[in-house]
């Protein structure tokens, strides 16, 4: 009798275990967990094979305890915005994405759910930086002022959206790359501030400038932000040099036309005068 009880008990336990395992198998691990971060707006993304599961994200700072965020619990989307939680910025964060069972009939234990870790991520070092805005103002024949406007970040502090400068502070520099129009040689300057004078330019030539945020303290792959659009100075308006072939042809054509009109008008006028004169002479000489 006792042994039957044991067998029954075992059977029940076994089937319960099978059901539990089946449920767990039902909830697949997520794949390709990765960080997408631009200007300190940081989103964790992943891919899944089955559609209707929910996901809960936990994360740790410098391998500390795992924490949850109210924004990333029981998500049905395959992404979670962690921008506001990854602070201080210069820390290494690791996230863990757990797949929740489809049915919520029983209390599952978070630790036992299938889960996938993200690669480590440090916003201060790894967040991509978008292009700065640039204006180029000529000072004199051989100097220009480059004026740079920093991109805004995804981080708000007391109702204000911070710029990349407000986060990176003195670690933020700029790489200014420029070339003389029509030449292939490029020159690079590293500048620490948003207003920079570039001198020793050839007088009267057009130059084109591009600027990118540059953070030398970062690892090589993430040091350089996106390049700005190119901004060029005007060549001195030296008329003879500037005129194109079409302009020359046009100018010659117009001059010729004007000349022909003048000649025609002169000839016609002369004929007119001569005729009037002749008529006058013949009239006056007639009655005599
Ligand atoms: C930064 O940009 C590069 C190139 O587009 C991309 O491969 C990388 O995944 C991006 N990194 C982050 C953290 O978004
Ligand atoms: C899963 O999604 C399908 C359709 O996409 C739906 O028919 C089914 O009821 C869902 N299952 C659960 C358990 O939500
Ligand atoms: C740089 O540009 C900003 C915005 O366009 C402007 O407010 C500022 O006066 C400019 N600074 C210089 C030195 O030209």
Image (spheres, helix red, strand yellow):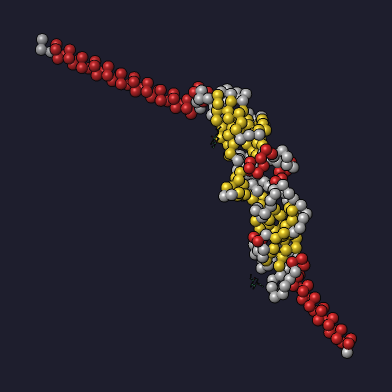
Q: Residue placed at 37% from the left, 21% from the top?
A: 259
Residue 102 % position (x, y): 69, 71
246 vs 193, left or right, is left
Residue 67 x/y as whole percent: 72, 59
**Most extreme residue toward the top, as rendered?**
288
- Please determine whether, in this image, residue 52 is positioned above or below residue 200: below
Give the farthest residue toward the bottom.
1
The image quadrant where one finds the C terminus is top left
On the question of residue 232 being in view, the answer is no
Is 65 situated above or below 225? below
Q: Residue at x 24, y 16 (%)?
A: 273
Total number of numbered labels? 0
Residue at the image position 61 percent from the left and 35 percent from the top: 194
Query: Quarter of the image holding residue 71?
Result: bottom right
On screen, residue 276 above or below 27: above
Asked if residue 163 shows in the view, the reply is: yes
């Amino acid at each position: 009798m006792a042994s039957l009880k044991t067998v029954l008990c075992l059977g029940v336990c076994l089937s319960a275990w099978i059901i539990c395992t089946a449920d767990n198998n039902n909830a697949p691990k997520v794949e390709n967990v990765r960080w997408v971060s631009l200007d300190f707006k940081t989103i964790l993304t992943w891919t899944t094979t089955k559609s209707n599961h929910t996901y809960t994200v936990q994360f740790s700072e410098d391998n500390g305890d795992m924490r949850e965020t109210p924004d990333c619990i029981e998500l049905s989307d395959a992404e979670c915005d962690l921008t506001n939680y990854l602070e201080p910025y210069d820390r290494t964060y690791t996230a863990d994405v757990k797949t929740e069972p489809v049915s919520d009939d029983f209390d599952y234990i978070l630790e036992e759910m299938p889960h996938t870790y993200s690669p480590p991520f440090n916003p201060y070092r790894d967040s991509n930086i978008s292009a700065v805005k640039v204006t180029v103002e000529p000072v004199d024949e051989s100097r220009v002022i480059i004026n740079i406007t920093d991109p805004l970040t995804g981080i708000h502090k007391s109702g204000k959206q911070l710029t990349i400068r407000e986060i990176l502070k003195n670690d933020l520099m700029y790489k200014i790359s420029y070339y003389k129009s029509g030449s292939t040689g490029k020159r690079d300057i590293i500048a620490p501030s948003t207003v920079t004078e570039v001198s020793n330019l050839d007088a009267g030539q057009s130059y084109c400038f591009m600027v990118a945020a540059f953070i030398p303290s970062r690892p090589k792959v993430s040091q350089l932000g996106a390049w700005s659009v190119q901004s060029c100075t005007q060549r001195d308006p030296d008329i003879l040099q500037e005129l194109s072939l079409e302009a020359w042809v046009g100018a010659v054509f117009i001059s010729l036309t004007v000349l022909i009109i003048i000649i025609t008008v002169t000839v016609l006028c002369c004929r007119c005068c001569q005729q009037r004169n002749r008529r006058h002479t013949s009239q006056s000489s007639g009655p005599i």
